[in-house]
Image (cartoon, rainbow, N blue to C red):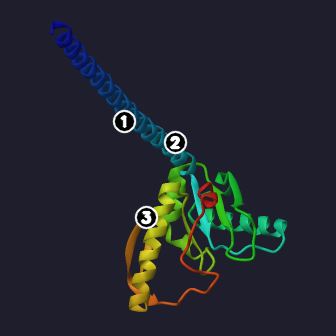
Amino acid sequence: MHLTRSVEILTKVNEELKNDINNLKVSSLGNFEHSKIETEQVLETIEEYFEKKEKEPCLVGINIPEKSKDDESATADRLLSENIVVAAGFKTEFIKEVCHHGRKGIGRPRVLKIRLEDKHMAMSVLRNKDVRSIVPPGSFLRKDLTKRELLLDKQLRKECYTRNQSLNLKKYVVRNLQIVELRQPRQWIAPTSNFLIPTYSHQSAAA
């Protein structure tokens, strides 16, 4: 009788011990996963911080026509960049780099990247009204965006496209990752097959 009772007690204690061990494992695993997620978020934030710092002094030209030959295109890009900088009141020596990103194809022109002295100069160029007359029709300049900002920019431009299409009027545009209403709306022209809603790949994100 006593032996049977002892076995029952030992069996119960053993089961409780197993449950405690399993609960501890689950709890530890949960804490580990939570810690892992937090670490990944911190690393992503750090990565985006340095990505943003790298892109701050840069301007990006969208839909700027390219020449058929690379050397001619390089000369034209440099001349355009110099005209843009001069129009904003800066010296051409502040241009540190001018290059295209992506693989050259038949469709939309590649992204043009213009690296300047610092971020303040880049923002001054973008705010300057005289610069807009230098950029070819159908093209525009914007700041260099991170991958996350590129996704947001794409969504905003889709929204602008939808609004303008419904109004049959170019009333909304995207500026500095915000939808802006134009004071003087213009005639809305439906984009051609080679000029649809601007999209940017991660390759463009590296611009």
Give the answer, above or below, for where 162 lies relative to 77.
Answer: below
Front label number (1 vs 3): 1
Give the CA distance from mark 2 to mark 3: 20 Å
Q: Are marks 1 and 2 in contact (CB under 8 Å)?
A: no
Q: Which residue is mark 3?
A: 177
Mark 3 secondary-structure assignment: loop
Q: Which class describes the residues within 10 Å of circle 2: few (<14), some (14-19), or many (20+)? A: few
Q: Which class describes the residues within 10 Å of circle 3: few (<14), some (14-19), or many (20+)? A: some
Which numbered disc, 2 or 3, marks the residue that appears first in the sequence?
2
Q: Which class describes the residues within 10 Å of circle 1: few (<14), some (14-19), or many (20+)? A: few
Observer able to see residue 38: yes
Percent coordinates x, y for residue 187 in the rendering: 47, 92
Q: Which residue is mark 1?
A: 34
Which numbered disc, 1 or 3, marks the residue that appears first in the sequence?
1
- Tell me the quarter of the picture where residue 104 sits: bottom right
Mark 1 secondary-structure assignment: helix
